[in-house]
Image (cartoon, rainbow, N blue to C red):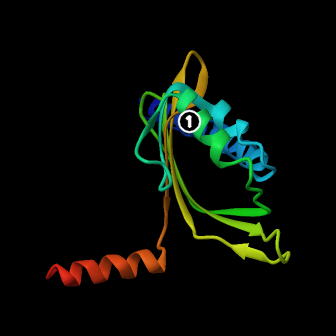
């Protein structure tokens, strides 16, 4: 009996590794396309009923068509020369149909004015992937700025002013 339990656990672990690899490959391919100015890679990963948040949107964007409009307006002008990921974490639910992917992304953009490579603020990313009809798609995507010193200082000053 114990032996069968061990085989079952190993099978689940192998399945989790396969799901994790697939999600990370999808994310990496979309990121490579985005670095070249092609935001469609990320857009293709989104479900039609996706929700999306980042600090530059006026609120939560709902639906792939609204995200596409935002991408078309915001991203064609940006080319990221280099990006790195840290703190990558994946959580897979027991039913193996939902994955929460989180990571920090550090981007570097080259100045069109003087050619200098600039490190932009560190991003937090959270993508919730859902398996539907055999395909993994992003159901929710959140981007936020991580540990921005000016933002942290501003919040500390505000809280101090409010007596906290």
Would you name the residue on which mark 1 appears? 67
Q: How would you rate the neighbour count of disc 1 (Cα within 10 Å): few for under 14, some for 14-19, many for 20 or more?
A: many
Q: Can you give x and y, in whole percent of width and height, for residue 148 in the image?
A: 48, 74
- Horizontal and vertical percent for residue 36? 81, 50
Occupied quadrant, residue 84 = bottom right
Q: Nearer the viewer, residue 5 or 40?
A: 40
Q: Position of residue 135 (x, y in %)?
A: 61, 23
Above-or-below relation of 90 to 98: below
Identify the residue at horizontal 68%, vertical 48% (top origin): 75
9 over 151 or under it: above or below: above
Say left or right for 37 vs 13.
right
Q: Secondary structure at mark 1?
A: helix
Vertical position of residue 19 compared to residue 76: above or below: above
**In percent of the image, x 16 and y 80: which residue is there?**
164
- Residue with the most extreme top position: 133
Spot occupied by residue 21 in the image (x, y as percentages of width and height): 67, 42
Question: Does residue 138 appear in the picture of this structure?
Answer: yes
User: Would you say 52 lies left or right of 79 here?
Assistant: left
Query: What number of labels is visible?
Result: 1
């Amino acid at each position: 009996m114990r032996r069968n339990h061990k085989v079952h656990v190993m099978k689940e672990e192998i399945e989790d590794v396969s799901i994790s690899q697939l999600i990370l490959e999808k994310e990496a391919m979309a990121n490579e396309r985005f670095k070249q100015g092609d935001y469609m890679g990320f857009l293709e990963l989104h479900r039609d009923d996706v929700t999306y948040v980042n600090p530059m949107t006026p609120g939560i964007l709902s639906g792939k068509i609204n995200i596409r409009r935002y991408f078309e307006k915001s991203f064609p002008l940006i080319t990221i020369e280099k990006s790195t990921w840290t703190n990558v974490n994946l959580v897979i639910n027991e039913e193996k149909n939902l994955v929460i992917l989180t990571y920090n992304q550090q981007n570097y953009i080259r100045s069109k004015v003087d050619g200098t490579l600039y490190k932009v603020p560190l991003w937090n990313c959270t993508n919730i992937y859902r398996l539907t009809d055999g395909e993994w798609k992003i159901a929710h995507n959140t981007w936020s700025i991580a540990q921005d010193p000016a933002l942290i200082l501003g919040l500390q000053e505000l809280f101090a002013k409010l007596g906290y």
